[in-house]
Image: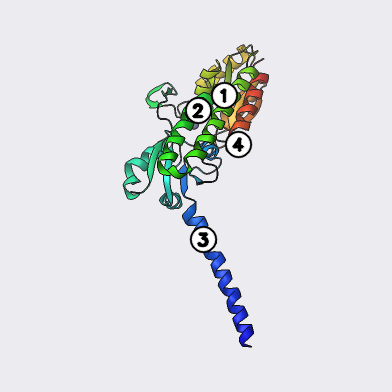
Amino acid sequence: MVKKIFFLFAILLSFLNLTWAKDIKNHKDIPTVSVSIPPQAFFVEKIAGDTVKINIILPPNTNEHHFEFKPSVMKKLEQSEIYFTIGLEFEKIFIDKFHHNFPNLEIVNMQKNIKLLDFQDSHHQKDPHTWLDPVLVQTMALNIYDALIQKYPENKNLYKENLNKFLAELDNLNLQISSKLENIKQKEFIVYHPSWAYFAKRYHLIQIPVENLGKEPKIKELKQLITFIKDKHIKTIFVQNGFPENAAKTLAHQCDAQIYIINHLSKDWEKELLKVSDALSKALK
Ligand SMILES: [Zn+2]
């Protein structure tokens, strides 16, 4: 009997010990960092590997310009040591109104040293969509690296190695996209939400948005677009999940064009850029 109790006690102890060790590993050893959108998580993971846990603030299929903070999101930020921002509206609200409640949360601007374009012809707002240009992502990768080595200097060698590997991958991706878009005849492509300005600039394309300053286009604007699409014999309308569909559907119907869904917020970032480049090379030849 005594033996049996002792045996059970030993099992209980080892179980407690295991849970305790696991607990320590999950909560103490691996710090959490936050990012606003999934592509940033792809970039941070490339450099940090599994030395950090990455929390993505924006829920799937959500318009990144109309998101508002909820208490559950605040809780995740409270557990984070770094928040990598990317020039979105909701980040500015967080920094202005709530950041003082998080004294241990370091804010790192991923777009440091990048010259931002004006957004949607508005001189009051800068275009945040730098993450769709692989060459600008190289600058963003350096910013991530700088922040990580300052916060976690013990991992410097790993981060340096990962950074160099990622920069080379981005060089290669840039070459691949350039060659896919080398022989296109047409420059203009129609896309619902104008998130492709930096990409278009890099690869000498012209982005024509359907959306007008964040809203569905008015009848007059829609008519102008229809004329334009017919004149240019454009047969593909690119749209994004999480944005209104009516105007794009009307255009496709009126102009006998196809709807093609792309995702500028994909976590599978590299694959998505290649997919979009293939679709563009087909649509613009
Ligand atoms: Zn956007």
Residue occupying the far bottom of the picture: 1
Q: Of the two numbered discs 3 and 1 on the same chain, state the one appearing first in sequence.
A: 3
Q: What element carries label 2?
A: helix
Residue that carries the numbered disc 1 in the rendered image: 171
Q: In front here: 1 or 81?
A: 1
Secondary structure type for disc 3: helix
- Residue 202, horizontal then vertical, whole percent: 53, 19
Q: Which amino acid does label 4 sit on?
A: Asp
- Of labels 3 and 4, earlier in sequence is 3
Quadrant containing the C terminus in the rendered view: top right
Work out whether mark 2 precedes mark 1 in sequence or the reverse, and give the earlier one: 2
State how far apart marks 2 and 1 are (Cα). 9 Å
Q: Please provide percent x and percent y for residue 70.
A: 43, 49
What distance separates the C-alpha of mark 3 from that of mark 1?
40 Å
Front-most of 66 and 142? 142
Tell me where residue 174 appears, x and y as whole percent.
Answer: 58, 22
Is residue 238 something that shows in the picture? Answer: yes
Tell me the amino acid under the disc marked 3: Asp
Q: Which residue is label 3 attached to?
A: 23
Q: Which amino acid does label 1 sit on?
A: Asp
Point out which mark residue 138 bears: 2
Mark 4 crowdedness (10 Å alpha carbons): few <14, some 14-19, many ≥20: few
Q: How far, Cα to Cα, is label 1 from label 4?
A: 18 Å
